[in-house]
Amino acid sequence: MSLHIFPVNFKQDITPESDLVDILISSNDCGIEDGDIIVVSQKIVSKQEGRAVNLDTVIPSELSIGIASAYDKDPKLVEAILSEAKRIVRMEHGVIIVQTKHGFVCANAGIDESNVDGNYVTLLPKDPDNSARLIRDGIRTKSGKKVAVIISDTFGRPFRLGQTDNAIGIAGIESILSYEGKLDTFGKILRVTAIAIVDELCAAAELVMGKTKMSPMAIIKNYQFDSKDDQISNLIRPGSDDLFK
């Protein structure tokens, strides 16, 4: 199997009036076919869904002011982080790690200050799975093609330096490829091997999307996958299985 990954270059910024499906169809040179996987940056989904906040309008609470003072942060940014957080996981060395309302554990509740004008920040989509479904369904309506859609975002990793892109919303693709019960090349039964394929596809797509190339979408071709509907929550490790809490 040989994967082909094509960036989709945008010529304009995204606003709530933008139609991401129209832009995708008109901006890519490789066409869309049945079985393609469309990887979409969280940033443009959040912008299109109006999930951008002007920090100048945010009124910080006393708690946010206290945390900001202790960790050298903007209290308005801290207030935005806390408003998106289900719980604080750790605060150390100026870093605020929280569990978002979606269940993701990440820095700053996924709030991003890059690639937005002025003092705006973007929040994660309220329902990234639904965001992926809307794009998937829009592509089917406008092109007649049956594709999978993954919403991607960049997360750090607790035990390794550097960031990688991960899936935060999916539609039309199974999140995990399990090898449990299958035989390896030496005939041994695999018992716990489960590959987070949607995360691996996001990481591969980011290599052509980049952060400064105005390519917030990518089309992955020639990857065989199970097209059944799934949800991103199936990738979140249950608390009972978390050995590091």
Image (cartoon, rainbow, N blue to C red):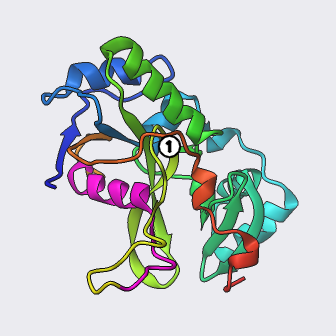
Q: Position of residue 109 (x, y in %)?
A: 63, 58
Q: Is residue 195 above or below residue 185?
A: above
Residue at 75% of width from left, 69% of height from top? 88
Q: Is residue 134 above or below residue 69?
A: above
SS at circle 1: strand
Residue at 43% of width from left, 43% of height from top? 150
Q: Is residue 80 above or below residue 11?
A: below
Q: Quadrant of residue 199?
A: bottom left
Toward the viewer: 26 or 226?
A: 226
Q: Quadrant of residue 235?
A: bottom right
Span colored in magenta: 188-209
Q: Position of residue 137 (x, y in %)?
A: 46, 22
Q: Give the total number of marks visible in the rendering.
A: 1
Name the kind of residue labelled 1 in the image.
Ile
Confirm whether the magenta stretch covers residue 204: yes
Q: Quadrant of residue 53?
A: top right
Q: Which residue reaches farthest front?
A: 187
- The local crowd at label 1, few if under 14, some if 14 to 19, many if 20 or more residues have their Cα within 10 Å, is many
Q: Which residue reaches farthest right?
A: 62
Q: Position of residue 17 (x, y in %)?
A: 47, 16
Q: Position of residue 234 (x, y in %)?
A: 61, 56
According to the picture, the residue beneath numbered tag 1 turns out to be 170
Q: Is residue 87 above or below residue 32?
A: below
Residue at 72% of width from left, 43% of height from top? 58
52 sits to left or right of 75: left
Asked if residue 19 shows in the view, the reply is: no
Toward the viewer: 56 or 193?
A: 193
